[in-house]
Image: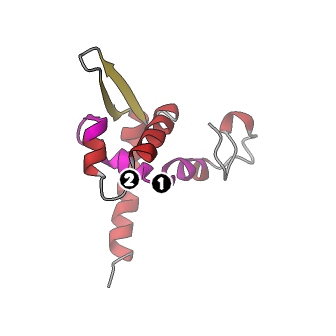
Amino acid sequence: MTTHLTKDPRETPEDIFCPIGYTIDIISKKRSLYIVRELTDSPKRYNQILKSLSWGITPKILSARLKELVEEKFINKKVHNTSPIGVEYSLTERGKEFIKAFKSVEKWSKKWNIIK
C-alpha cells in the first residue's frame, strides 16, 4: 500500500524515506488510531468494534480501515469457521509495539493539550 504523503518504503531510497511520516500516514487515516486502540485489551469482532466506535464511524469506513490495517500488519484478521462465519481482529506484534511506543505521545498530549 502506498500512502499519499510518503512513498512505500520498498520503493523509496533510505535517504528519502521517513519512517515516522509513513507510520503517521497509516494511523492518521480516518479512525485508524481509534480502531487500533480498541483492540489494545483483547481481540474483537467487527460488530463489537463498530458498536464501540458508533459515535464516529460508518460500516463502510470501518471495513476500509480494517482492511488497510491488516495489509499494513497492524492487526490480524482471523476467520472462524462457524455458522454464521465469524471474523475476529487482534493486534499483531507490530500493532502491540506501536501501542507501547504511542504511550509516550499520549502522556505528552495529556500534559500539553488540555482543553480549557
Q: Is residue 40 visible?
A: no
Give the color scheme: rainbow, by chain, secondary structure or one colour: secondary structure
Q: Report the side of 26 relative to 101 (left or right).
A: right
Q: Which residues are magenta?
A: 22-47
- State how far apart marks 2 and 1 are (Cα): 9 Å
Q: Position of residue 6 (x, y in %)?
A: 68, 49
Tell me the residue at 65%/40% (across/down). Answer: 2
Location of residue 62 by image quarter: top left
The residue depicted at 60 percent of the width and 53 percent of the height is: 21
* Residue in the picture at 34% in, 23% down: 78
Which amino acid does the dot numbered 1 rest on?
Answer: Lys
Callout 2 crowding tier (Cα within 10 Å): few <14, some 14–19, many ≥20: some
Residue 105, given in percent of the width and then of the height, sits at: 40, 60
Q: Return the residue found at the far bottom.
A: 116
Q: Circle 2 — which element?
A: loop
Q: Give coordinates of residue 36: x percent, y percent.
A: 37, 45
Decide whether residue 46 is among the magenta residues: yes
Q: Is residue 6 visible?
A: yes
Mark number for residue 57?
2
